[in-house]
Amino acid sequence: MVELDKKIKEAITNLPELKVQGYSILEIAGFPHYENVISNLLAFYFDFNEKHGLKDLFIKALFSSLNLSKEYIYSDTINVYKEVLTKKNKRIDLIIELDEYVIAIENKIFHTLNNPLDDYENYMKLTYPDKKCIGVLLSIHPIKLKARSFFKPILYHKYCRSLSAKLGLYLTTSNNFQASFVTDFIKTLDNLKKDSIMNNEVIEYMSNYYDEFVKIQELFTVYFKEVHQKMNTLEEVLDLKKYTKSSRRLKSKDQLKNLIIYNLKDSYETKNSQLKAKITPKGWTIELWGTNLLSNRKKMLFANLNDFKVNENSVEYVTLKKAKYQTHPSEFKYFIEGSIKELYKIDLD
């Protein structure tokens, strides 16, 4: 156990910094990994005839990412096609047709590229022989292409950086919603890249301390099982039906803190009051919440007046008892039942 304790302390010392990043609207909606959703958004914003007010922002940023800014000439017409079918029944994610250029875009959110890029290239050159054809592979992660490939790889990180740099120039023509949504779109793609880097770091860390984590997990499994039994026992031994409306059990997010909340019946001195029994590895805590209406005389039956505290929601509470983790739940029976009986003594007895 001493050696395990030493290893755990070493693991904690070397714990990588986990930066909590805010979620974008698309992430909250659960869409960031859907390539077709990203493609649909790109198609909408590439088309400067759509009513987003951002004109050619997305096209200009694309040319900039291709290092073709000097060759970009504003086009009078634009056609954006989605899921274009080739003669071999393969689908090109997007095709953007301008006056002089035609751009095929393969959108890749995931690592794997199994698409027939040669077929896409042949389709483009046969369909648009009089225009300059460009293939673009947009991806979150670097994907290696063959030498002199028709498709040019662009990382979303680079493309989004170009979008961000130019967005301010289009704010006067777009509405606030569209500008905000594009900012959210950029954040979504940026978070996907950051999330990948963070996960690799965490996985490497967990690999280095795998054996220690297995042992810790075993300890937690035993703890969770024992706490569950302790709470069952507490509910079984307590007889509070006369004084409670309902009860429920809760766990903290990390499951280390378990509690039973008894919702007490309303009376002259008690409104929305609760009895809370909590247990963590540090021990038991028995609390009485919603003591705001109690007289000072009644409060002093439970604790000194200066022991009563108020939380951020102006709810007053007091800690009635603390005990070690090893304390058997049955030892609380007479204390808790006696305290609640005393609380209702005037009203119900």
Image (cartoon, rainbow, N blue to C red):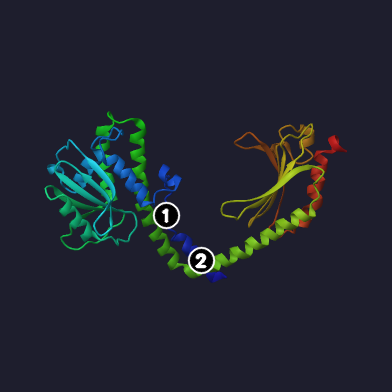
209 or 83, which lies in front? 83
Indicate left or right for 39 with 298 as reference. Answer: left
Examine the image and state in which quarter residue 150 appears.
bottom left
Q: Position of residue 243 (x, y in %)?
A: 80, 42
Q: Is residue 277 left or right of residue 169?
A: right
The circle drawn on residue 96 is none
Q: CA distance from mark 1 to mark 2?
A: 18 Å
Q: Amino acid at mark 1?
A: Glu
Please tell me which residue is depicted at 30% across the width and 56% down the height of the picture.
141
State the residue position of label 1: 17
- The percent position of residue 43, horizontal first and vertical second, equals 29, 43
| Towards the viewer: 83 or 164 | 83
Q: Which mark is residue 213?
A: 2
The picture places residue 130, in percent across and down from the top left corner, at 11, 48
Residue type at tag 2: Phe
SS class of the residue under badge 2?
Answer: helix
Quarter of the image that includes the C terminus: top right
In the image shown, does 53 or 128 lie closer to the viewer?
Answer: 128
